[in-house]
Image (cartoon, rainbow, N blue to C red):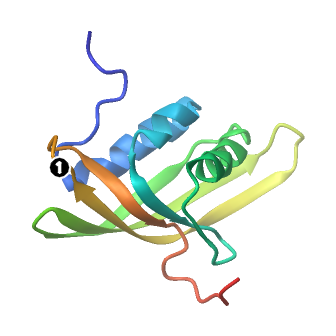
Amino acid sequence: MPESFPLPTEPEGVIPSLLERFNSGKVEAMMALYAPEAVFVAKDGRTITDRTEIAAQFQRDMSLGLPLKANVRDVCVGGDTAQVVVDWSIYGKDPGGEDVHLGGSASDIVRRGADGRWRYIIDNNQGTAVRQPA
């Protein structure tokens, strides 16, 4: 049986896979794109390593019911590691009718695993934003 959300075999496939997974609304599909040791950098600058807390971040954003959009600016590959720079946004009205304007320019790091699939090791979705550490 084929995978519902196949993991990318090239670093350029990470963002299309991310979009498909996020827009499916399935948190477990999102988490499969993240290595067990992955770090998620929250908007307030905190680094999150707990997978349950990372999943909660995704669930919060997915519960808005709005699509994630992204434009890849650069993919820089060095061996089994790559940096992906991407502009992303989530815009629209949430289920309560409130305006939502989320977005940024991410600077993410992905790595090829022993299985040949690429997964996030650092998700810094506000990568170019100047912020104070939490």
Task: Give the position of the C terminus as an image quadrant.
Answer: bottom right
Q: Tell me the kind of residue under disc 1.
A: Glu
Which residue sits at x=15%, y=46%? Answer: 114
**Which residue is the site of mark 1?**
10
- In which quarter of the view is residue 33 placed? top left
Residue lying at the far left in this picture: please name it: 79
Direction from residue 74 to residue 100 in the image, left or right: right
Task: Give the position of the N terminus as an image quadrant.
Answer: top left
Residue situated in front as seen by the camera: 72 or 123: 123
Q: Secondary structure at mark 1?
A: loop
Q: Position of residue 110 (x, y in %)?
A: 30, 60
- In which quarter of the view is residue 44 placed? bottom right
Q: Position of residue 130 (x, y in %)?
A: 59, 89
Which residue sits at x=56%, y=49%? Answer: 51
Which residue sits at x=41%, y=57%? Answer: 37
The 10 Å Cα crowd at callout 1, few under 14, some 14 to 19, many 20 or more, is: some
Residue 86 vertical placement versus 57 (above, below): below
